[in-house]
Amino acid sequence: MYTFLVDETNKDAGQGEFFIVGGLVFREDQVSDVHAAVARQRRLAGYRPGESFKFETNSRPAHVTIEQHREAKRELISDLSDLGVRMIVSVVLHDLCRNQTYDERMEWALNTLAGGYRKLLLDEGETGIMLMDRDNDRYDHLEYLHQHGLRIFTGNHVRVDDRIRLFGMTSDNASHLSSAADICLGAFRYCANTASGRGREPVAREMFPNLAKLVWAKPNSQGELRAGGLGYLPRPKRQHIAVSWMRDRYDNLADGLNSYVLPEVAEAPSRN
């Protein structure tokens, strides 16, 4: 039984060019090790019970220094990479979905992630649960996903309950797994924003190689790991974007993320 913890970031265009929703997939045998890894980094950085360990620097308690917080995040992402945790993330250009409400954008992203997660579960012959960060406006949609599945362009539905057996919600400080998901998604947001010109490139170059190892990928016929269409899910797909400058934004994002990956690390997301 796998567990997929999901959150959102870059909620509006003022925070970044892309609306990003995603999270981490944990195998059952990884849960205890991930819990221990987060607990260890909390202890080393000086976090006390009840204090949130998240990506944002401003979220840290006053007695934890910026350097302690930065080191804890860096080491945790490295730990998660070593443990083989996977990441699935959806990105949507804000300019492309400006006519959608937040509810529509969020539910579109959840559909994309549920489809990607189901693909992973099918590929590995497993079942799982999918939990998102608490959002009281999303209960009806989670129920719809369980009862009906994904509605496709023909009007028909693709069921997901054959693999995803539970949809639900969790919250910050309800588990160390939530901290791990928040930190990885925050790191991905920082790197994506930097690729769009809103961050410090040296920081992204240091951060992204270990993060890229988390993005679910399989080797191609040449033995190269590529994440496009698996753990990295830009939507809509490139061939469905009619406006050239919007396609360019997606291409620039993929190219920027690729540029942060060291040569010896598996390739970052492809454009498709």
Image (spheres, helix red, strand yellow):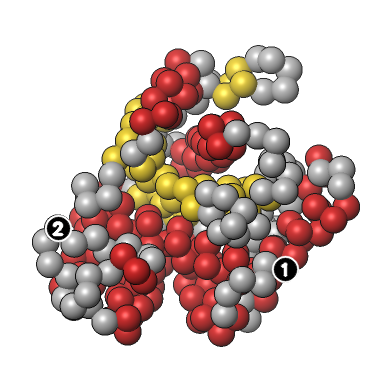
Residue 168 lies, in percent from the top left, at 34, 31
Dot label at residue 85: none
Tag 2's secondary structure?
loop
Task: Please state the total of marks drawn on the protein image.
Answer: 2
Horizontal relation, residue 37 to residue 210: left or right: left
Front in this rendered view, residue 238 or 12: 12
Horizontal relation, residue 250 to residue 133: left or right: right
Q: Are marks 1 and 2 in contact (CB under 8 Å)?
A: no
Dot label at residue 255: 1
**Image quadrant of residue 147?**
top left
Dot 2 corresponds to which residue?
A: 50
Residue 251 lies, in percent from the top left, at 76, 61
Residue 26 lies, in percent from the top left, at 35, 50
Q: Could you tell me the amino acid type at mark 1?
A: Asp
Horizontal relation, residue 236 to residue 130: left or right: right
Within 10 Å of disc 1 (Cα), the crowding (few <14, some 14-19, many 20+) is some
Q: Alpha carbon of mark 1 to alpha carbon of mark 2: how far?
A: 40 Å
Residue 266 lies, in percent from the top left, at 59, 70
Within 10 Å of disc 2 (Cα), the crowding (few <14, some 14-19, many 20+) is few
Tag 1's secondary structure?
helix
**Image quadrant of residue 241?**
top right
**Identity of the residue drawn at 34% across and 69% down:** 58
**Identity of the residue drawn at 53% across and 32% down:** 103
> Where 181 falls versus 258 (above or below)?
above
